[in-house]
Amino acid sequence: MGGAAAALLVARAHPAAAAPSSPVALARCDSYALDGVLGSLRTLLDQTGGLRRLVSGKTVAVKVNLVNTPSQQAAGLPASRTYHVHPNVARALAMLLDEAGARRIRFLESTFSRQPIEEFFTSGGWNLRDFQSLRAAVDFEDTRNLGRGKKYHRVRVPWGGSLYPAYDLNHSYVDCDVYVSLAKLKNHSAAGVTLAMKNNFGITPTALYGGPRASEENTSNRANFHSGMVPLPVGLPAEVDPASPRRQTYRVPRHTVDAVGIRPIHLAIIDGIETVSGGEGPWVQQLVRQTPRLLIAGRNPVCTDAIATACMGYDPMAGPATGPFPGDNHLALAAALGLGTNDPRRIEVVGLPLDRAIHPYRYEPRMRNG
């Protein structure tokens, strides 16, 4: 038996003991002024191991949480100050990656739009000239379909899959040396919290997973990962358990974990300077503006999300359909697979102490196991 397989068996038998722990850094950041964000993010990344050894001479892919239309406001404020990663957080990260010697930086998002990806980013307040003036080559790609790639890449889930055993991906998630999840600190209607791990949910192309027929023009939602009622196109891997529950509070957490399996996260960064509670975007009615004034970073996405969840005033070890989780807790599912611990008592917090970072969101879902 190989070492990886043996480790997985140990993790399944003793998840609490086997799940690794990695430090998570917290910083207070009062606004999106570039100098302040740059300084705080530099400190966070230094506290979690530094960037140069991780990225020097390499291609770095950054998946950004820019869900839905950038021009749509929430709680009376622009998307970047509520449910999108702010452009200055992305710009500060690009500047630090460039300074650390990254050869290429590629910003990724899977949109629901057919407009050129550069226009999509620009409509969200990004000044692309700021990024393209760096020494590193910087480009942008919409991973909802093939994009600039010539073929999809099938990647197997290391543990056999929670929903599917393998998924097809845009080349950008394979053609990189380092992968960063740049997320927002907010709730999610089906997952409870959407942070670095849930940001990965959007890596699968809607061209293949947006309906029963594959189409490069498809901009539909990935309904099968929510309801399980829409068949996937012929040729994609069949579901691990076709008799599994068809409810989104079962399927969304499991696809979230699968997505971390097919595209492991080397660096998790969470924008919690300004955000919202109550859901993931303005299509959810009960959004409330939140100002945690936090930036969060870590090398292990489960540990990072666990501490981020604690910063929101929740227990990251909460049981199914309790606390912020309307169904299964994807952090607990990931910990049970040995991907990282979700026990905050086992995670070293550096920088701002956790007890000073807590900003209670005071939101719990009204509907559970739906």
Image (cartoon, grey):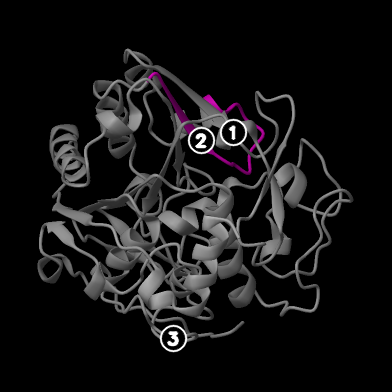
Q: Label 1: how many residues lie within 10 Å, few (<14), some (14-19) or many (20+)?
A: many
Disc marking residue 366: none
Which one is in front in this view, the residue at disc 3 or the one at disc 2?
Answer: 3
Which sits in the foreground, 54 or 9? 9
Taking the image as drawn, is residue 18 in sight?
yes
Q: Which of marks 2 and 1 is nearer the N terminus?
A: 2
Which quadrant would residue 261 be assigned to in this image? Answer: bottom right
Q: Is residue 115 magenta?
A: yes
Q: Do the residues labelled 2 and 1 touch (CB within 8 Å)?
A: yes
Q: What residue is pinned by disc 1?
A: 142
Residue 4 x %, y %: 53, 57
What is the spatial separation of the Cα atoms under label 3 and label 1, in whole angstroms? 36 Å
Which sits in the foreground, 303 or 71? 303
Q: What residue type is labelled 1?
A: Asp
Q: Which amino acid does label 3 sit on?
A: Gly
Disc marking residue 319: 3
User: What residue range appears in magenta?
Assistant: 103-118
Element at label 2: strand
Residue 251 x %, y %: 64, 70
Disc marking residue 108: 2
Q: Are marks 3 and 1 in contact (CB under 8 Å)?
A: no
